[in-house]
Amino acid sequence: MNFNTLEFILLYLPIVIGLTYTVPPTWRLRVLLLASLVFYGISGLLPLAFLIASVLWGYAFALLFRRHRSTGALLAAVSLPLLTLFLGKYLRFTLDTIGVGDTVRTAFAPVLAIALPAGISFYTFKIISYELDVYDGKVKATSSLTLLASFFCLFPHLIAGPILRFADLQQQFTRLATERKIDADWNGAIKFFAIGLFYKTFFADMLRGLHESYPLFAAANNYWDTWYYVLSYAFVIYFDFWGYSLMAIGLAKMVGIDFPRNFREPYMSASPKEFWRRWHITLSFWLRDYVYLKLGGNDRYVRNILIVFLVTGLWHGAGWNFVLWGGYHAVFVLLYHFSRRWWDAWPLLVQRCITFMVVALGWPLFFLKPDGYVDLLARLAPTSTHWASSFGLHHWLIMGIVAAWTFFVREDKLIFNTDRPSFLDNPVLLGIGTFMSVLFLNYARTFIYFQF
C-alpha cells in the first residue's frame, strides 16, 4: 500500500488512527502491529510470511544472547534475514553473474518467480542492527514480542525507512503502551505529511511523468534532452524519497512517535563526503556503525570506504549498474579526501555546484546498464550533432521551479522551524496543498525506494 493513494488517506489511515486512540493503552501496540501487517500484507502473503519469519527469528536469537553468546550464535542470528534478502533480491543477479545453465536455473525457478518483497532491505537492516546491538550489549533484549514486532513493522517506516535503532525508540513505544494519553504533535504531523505528499505529487511525480512522456533518448545524440533527463532525475529521486520520509515523520507523529530527520538539504553539500552526511542519513549512520567501524574505520580508510560504498550500491539494487554506482561514489569520496586542501579552498558556490553535478551524473545508473550509462556520458558532450530538444519550454520551466525550491528554500526555516512559525505552518495553506495533491493522486507513482 502506498501513502499517496486515496485508499490509504481516506480509509486505512482514519481507521488505524481511530482505533489507536480508542483502545486501552495496553492494546495500542497490538492495534498498530496488526494494522502494519495488513498494510504490508496487501502486497502479498508470501512477502508477509518472509517479514514475520525474520521478525520472529530476530526476537528469538536476541533472547538467546542473554544466556549464550558466541560467533556461531551471531552468524546463525543474522543468517535467516540475510538469506531471505539474498533469495528475494540477489539470487537472480548471482545466477546471471556466474552464468549457470538452464538446469540449475530451473531448480531455482520457484524462488525466482517470487516478486521482490517491498522494503526488504530496510527491515532486514533494522533486524540485523537489533541483533548486533543486543549481542554487543548496547541494548537489552526485550521479552515483549509485541513491542519488538511493532518497532520492526510500524507502517510509517516499514517500506522505505528511515532505518531506525531499537534503542532510540524503545522508550517511545513503551510510553505509547502505558500512558493514558497519547502525546501527539498533530500540528507537526499534518504539516510533515502534507508537505511530503506535495513534494511527491508535484515535484517528484510531475517530473517523473515528463520523463516517461518521451521515449528515453529518442533522438540520437540529443544533447539537451540528455541533460534534461540527468538533471530532472536528480530532483525526481530526491523529492520522491524525501517526500516519503516527511510523510513517514508525519504519520509517526500522529501516534506520538518521533522519527529522526533523514535528509538535510543534500544538494547543498560542498563535497561528496558531506553529501553522504546529508543524504539518507539513517542509512549512512547504519553503514558507518555496522560496516565501516566493524572493519576498522579510519585504520584502513581506502579499503573500508570502497567496501562500504560497494555494499551501499548492492543494497540499492541487484545489478552491476548499482555496483558501479557505489564504486562511483567511493572514488569521489576518496578523491575529495586526498585533495580536500585544494577542494576546500574553492569558493563555496563552486564546491556545491561540482558536488551536485557529481551526484546528478551518478543517478542514471539507477535505470541504465553500464553500457547505456557510457552512451549517456557520450551524449552529454557538446559535440552532439542534434541540438534541438524534445522538451518544450514548460518542461524546462517546471524543472527550474523545482530546482529553485531545492537550492534557495531553507528547510530549517520553513519546515523544521521549531522556534519561529513560517508560512508553511498556515493550516489553510496546508489544507489547500493537501487538497491539490489529492486531486492529482490518479497520476501518482509508486515510491522509487519501495524496490529497495
Image: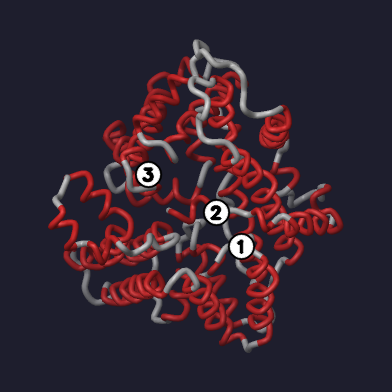
For image coordinates 57% across by 41% down, the residue present is: 212
Q: Give 335 or 158, whichever is nearer the viewer.
A: 158
Q: Secondary structure at mark 1?
A: loop
Q: What amino acid type is highlighted by mark number 2?
A: Phe
Q: Quadrant of residue 10?
A: bottom right
* Res. 343 visible in picture: yes
Viewer-nearest of discs 2 and 3: 2
Q: Position of residue 153 (x, y in %)?
A: 47, 70
Dot 2 surroundings within 10 Å: few (below 14), some, or many (20 or more)? many
Q: Give 342 or 35, whichever is nearer the viewer.
A: 35
Q: Secondary structure at mark 2?
A: loop
Q: Position of residue 121 (x, y in %)?
A: 39, 57
For image coordinates 78% across by 55% down, the residue present is: 436
Q: Whole-Å distance between the Cαs marked 3 and 1? A: 26 Å
Label 2 belongs to which residue?
447
Mark identifier at residue 3:
1
Q: Secondary structure at mark 3?
A: helix
Would you say the residues marked 2 and 1 are in contact, meaning their CB atoms lie under 8 Å apart? yes
Q: Give 173 or 191, whichever is nearer the viewer.
A: 191
Figure quadrant of the N terminus: bottom right
Direction from residue 6 to residue 452 in the image, left or right: left
Dot 1 surroundings within 10 Å: few (below 14), some, or many (20 or more)? many
Viewer-nearest of discs 3 and 1: 1
* Res. 136 visible in picture: no
Q: What amino acid type is highlighted by mark number 3?
A: Thr
Q: Quadrant of residue 113?
A: bottom left
Label 3 belongs to which residue?
312
Q: What amino acid type is highlighted by mark number 1?
A: Phe
Direction from residue 196 to residue 132 in the image, left or right: left
